[in-house]
Image (cartoon, grey):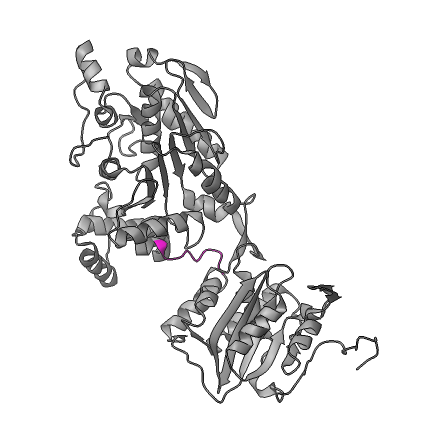
Amino acid sequence: MSAPPIKVRSKPAPAPQTPAEWEERLSDPWWRLTSGVLYKIMVKGDPDDPAASSVMPFLPNVNQIRFLTGMHDRNVILKARQLGFTTAASIIALDHALFVPNQRCGIIAHELDVAAEILRDKVKFAYTNMPPELRDSMPLLRESAKELLFAHNNSAIRVATSMRGGTIHRLHISEMGKIARKYPAKATEIVTGALPAVPANGVATIESTAEGTEGEFFDIAQRAENMAKAGVKAGPGQFKFHFFPWFMDPGYVANPRKVKISAKQHEYFDKLEIEVDQPISMRQRAWYVLKMENDFSGDQQKMFQEMPSTPKEAWSRSTEGTYLTPQLDLARRQGRIGNVPYMPGLPVHTFWDIGAGDGTGIWLMQQHGLASRFIRYIEDWGKGYSHYVNELRRTGFVFGQMYLPHDATQTRQLETKIGAPLDMLQDLAPDWSWQIVPRVHDFQAGIEILRNRFSEAWIDEEGCKEGIQHLSLYRKKFNTRLGQFIDEPEKQDGHSEAADAIRQWAQGFTPSLIPATGGNRRSGGRKRTRSTGMTA
């Protein structure tokens, strides 16, 4: 679609008057989408004017125009809320289906009810309210809550929470960040099933507000953003990065006389002006402060997520449901996460989480006075215990105590025999001293112990990079039926191993009680037996 420079209409263009004029205008997709003549949308009514119409011509706003002018064959949109991209996507899909024969257009939403609402209130509404003669020349052959199939050209639009199979010539995925966070398996299915169904000459668009720094949406958007930062133009089949901040919407303004803007808030806006090279007016500042106070109870982090000014703000992680965010934030402010080097002459203690079929995480720590100095974090998945013993030996460190969780004494299927993890580790490293950390009475008590002791922790940012990331993302399980987090850790996202390993330090390490180093010490377990079954 060729497009003129960005220009936003404030009112619809004049309607064509003759059949020749209609034919000319209808051959131009840009006119069809931006003139305001063909399509109407439902909008929120004006609370100050009950008589104001809630039905308006679709006139793309500045952000929608920016997207239309820069559209690529693969697009990923990181945005502020309520910019109307789902509405625009619905009109774009409808227009393509109406005017191009034998096309399949799809819109994916994060929930089935939302998908049905998009089809009913955006796509079908716009179709129903087209100029009657034009609409009647493009009749529906079949209609359901999930699909519209047009009789005149065999094109169709369908909505779903995922799509697999067939060909999708135009695909729009709405709120992919929410899908990835709440339904990661569904997000993977979209990436492996729906996106490959879009042909090379088709168009796929993924849009969302940010929902944290993990998941399919983050991965796709981050790759595209990094390409854009490097000045690399997206080629065919590569995702192009689009970012739409709140301040680009001309409607996001308020009366500054009715809003108190603090000096700290003005400082934020002043820095933002420099960063984005654009003035932030008093009316825009007033709207931002009002929005944050009224909708988000003054929570700046939620404003970053829902109404970001920059991609960096958007990606700043959500703390909802996380276990250790306040402790990590305090550690950073106090300088306890940074350069924490190895100190020769001090033994290195290790704290393990050993998974039964999943991952293993190990923190390496030196105690210096009252400071527990974490210098390295090691993790892997699907590897035998010999792998981790070899990784530790390669460090060349002199080890003190090896702290294992209570279930290390439980019998399980090992690589070639049935036994306890502790037994295998002692066989692999008989010169190391192994300690079993007693089990606490419940999980929440262990978390509280870790939170209370976190002020003792100093963590090397480079050597423990993956561990820090896991701790920052360690969160409660999200119950999709209840729509809320529950007091149970999420075990399926790969972040629990690091947290469970460092809990062994909090629950089991007391500097004044460190036993003398020496081969094969252990506590909290059963007596070791020889292969004959006799007690050693």
What is the magenta range?
Answer: 315-322
* Viewer-side residue, 273 vs 176: 176
Q: Quadrant of the N terminus?
A: top left
Left or right, residue 280 beside residue 343: left
Q: Residue at 45% x, 32% y: name it.
A: 115
Vertical arrangement, residue 338 with respect to residue 125, above or below = below
Q: Is residue 291 magenta?
A: no
In front: 469, or 317?
Answer: 469
Instruction: Give the main secondary structure, helix, strand or loop, of the magenta stretch.
Output: loop
Q: Quadrant of residue 351?
A: bottom right
Q: Nearer the viewer, residue 504 or 334?
A: 504
For the C terminus, the image quarter is bottom right
Number of marks: 0
* Percent x, y of residue 468: 45, 67
**Rendering coords of residue 479 (x, y %):** 56, 48
Residue beneath the point at 23% across and 39% down = 66
Q: At x 26% / y 55%, what residue is drawn?
A: 230
Say whether residue 308 is visible: no
Q: Nearer the viewer, residue 355 or 305?
A: 355
Asked whether residue 320 is drawn in magenta, I would say yes
Taking the image as drawn, is residue 166 in sight? yes
Residue 124, quarter of picture? top left
Position of residue 491 measured from the top left corner of the image (x, y, whole percent): 57, 57
The image shows residue 32 at horizontal and vertical percentages of 24, 23
